[in-house]
Image (tube, rainbow, N blue to C red):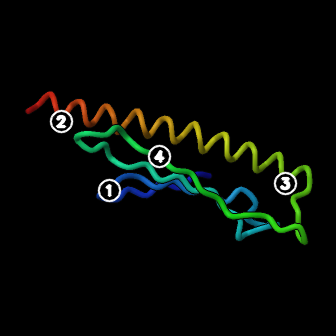
């Protein structure tokens, strides 16, 4: 499940795709509100896997699916923030 946190600077999305087997692994997306001279910016980050404790194939597939879902959700938030900015600009 993707968690959404709204801040004054933008939106942060987080997901822990393997909470029972590897609870420290997480994916994050930070999407900033557009600035006057820039569009919406988004950055994705994630924790790593060590060679001593690699992902099994099923865990890797789960990780891929979670990353894909996070990217799709990030695109949705980007569109949402762009639309909000257009509405604010149109009111002025």
Dot 1 or dot 3, earlier in sequence: 1
Label 1 with label 2: CB-CB less than 8 Å: no
Q: Which residue is mark 2?
A: 88
Q: Which secondary structure, mark 4?
A: strand
Dot 1: few (<14), some (14–19), or many (≥20) neighbours within 10 Å? few
Question: Which-is-in-front pick, marks 4 and 2?
Answer: 4
Q: 23 above or below 88? A: below
In screen coordinates, is 90 left or right of 47? left
Dot 3 or dot 4, earlier in sequence: 4
Q: Which residue is mark 4?
A: 42
Q: Which residue is mark 1?
A: 9
The label on residue 59 is 3
User: Measuring 54% from the left and 40% from the top, which residue is drawn there?
Assistant: 73
Q: Which secondary structure, mark 2?
A: helix
Inter-mark Cα distance, 4 to 2 = 20 Å
Q: Which secondary structure, mark 1?
A: loop
User: Measuring 36% from the left and 52% from the top, which residue is drawn there?
Assistant: 10
Dot 1 or dot 2, earlier in sequence: 1
């Amino acid at each position: 499940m993707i968690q959404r946190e709204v801040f004054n600077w933008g939106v942060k999305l987080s997901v822990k795709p393997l909470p029972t087997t590897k609870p420290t692994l997480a994916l994050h997306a930070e999407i900033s509100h557009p600035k006057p001279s820039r569009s919406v910016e988004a950055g994705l980050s994630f924790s790593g896997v060590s060679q001593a404790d690699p992902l099994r194939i099923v865990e890797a597939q789960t990780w891929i699916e979670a990353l894909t879902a996070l990217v799709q959700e990030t695109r949705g938030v980007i569109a949402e923030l762009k639309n909000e900015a257009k509405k604010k600009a149109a009111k002025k």
